[in-house]
Image: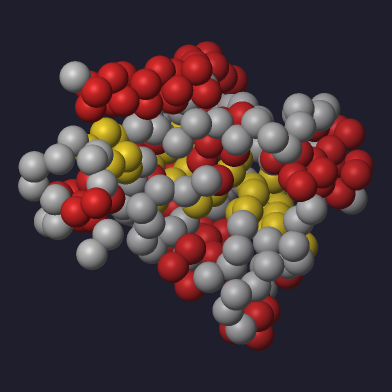
Amino acid sequence: YFLPACDAFITMSKKVEQDLRSFVADKPILQIRHPLYDNFGSPVAKDKAREHLGISSDTRVLLFFGFIRAYKGLDLLLKALPLIREQNILLVVAGEFYDEPAAYHRLINELGIENKVKLMADFIPSDQVRFYFSAADLVVQPYRNATQSGVTPLAYHFDKPMVVTNVGGLPDYVENEKTGLIAEPEPASLAQAINRFFEFGADRFSAQICEKKKELSWPVFIDQLLQLFYRLKK
């Protein structure tokens, strides 16, 4: 009922565009990248961010950020932790549970990784978001399925490389071994990608992340919207 009333459409991933094409055959569809989330403040120094969160300055920190739901694959990431070669590692889980927490606590205990996981499972106020991203070495999105994710442009804003899974629109935003790494949604592949990140070192990704941020800027986003608008007016 809704789609016939529209003159054109904007999607933010190939997956959504493909789904939309099954309903819309003859109207323009603009696939456009989700611009940077720059409304959570500027990055802070890593040591300062870790002090704020009570995290040791010499720890390698992985960040899982956002609501905890089954499709986001936190359990896959937990199962990957014992396979990561870096021993001094901490997974920070920052976000509210939308699943039953007991299953995750049980899995952590079964895997014996209590000392490698910091559960900060609560709503994260906007003024605190920058501390979590600034404290991290790597942002991990171990999703089982996805269209796209707002965590990706948020990570880019804070200059953080990512490991994302090869599902939905996530690989559209991350250039493998340039701005991050792409893994399959299963523990061994996630662990392999994280191991590879630590072999490379964060500096390998810095220049490419800087270039990607230009592509994801708000001026670029607005220019693409205007081009679509002017096409429709002709």
Image quadrant where one finds the C terminus: top left
Name the residue furthest left. 25
Along the line of sight, the residue nearer the viewer: 232 or 117: 232
Write the residue at 24% across / 51% down.
5
Residue 161 visible from this viewpoint: no
Q: Position of residue 103 (x, y in %)?
A: 59, 83
Along the line of sight, the residue nearer the viewer: 23 or 46: 23
Residue 62 position (above or below residue 130):
below
Residue 53 position (above or below residue 224):
below
Write the residue at 91% across / 42% down.
51
Horizontal side of residue 195 vs 174, given as left or right:
right
Q: Position of residue 37 (x, y in %)?
A: 60, 35
Q: Quadrant of residue 102?
A: bottom right
Horizontal side of residue 192 vs 156, given as left or right:
left
Residue 142 position (above or below residue 162):
below
The figure's colour scheme reads secondary structure
Q: Position of residue 13 (x, y in %)?
A: 32, 43
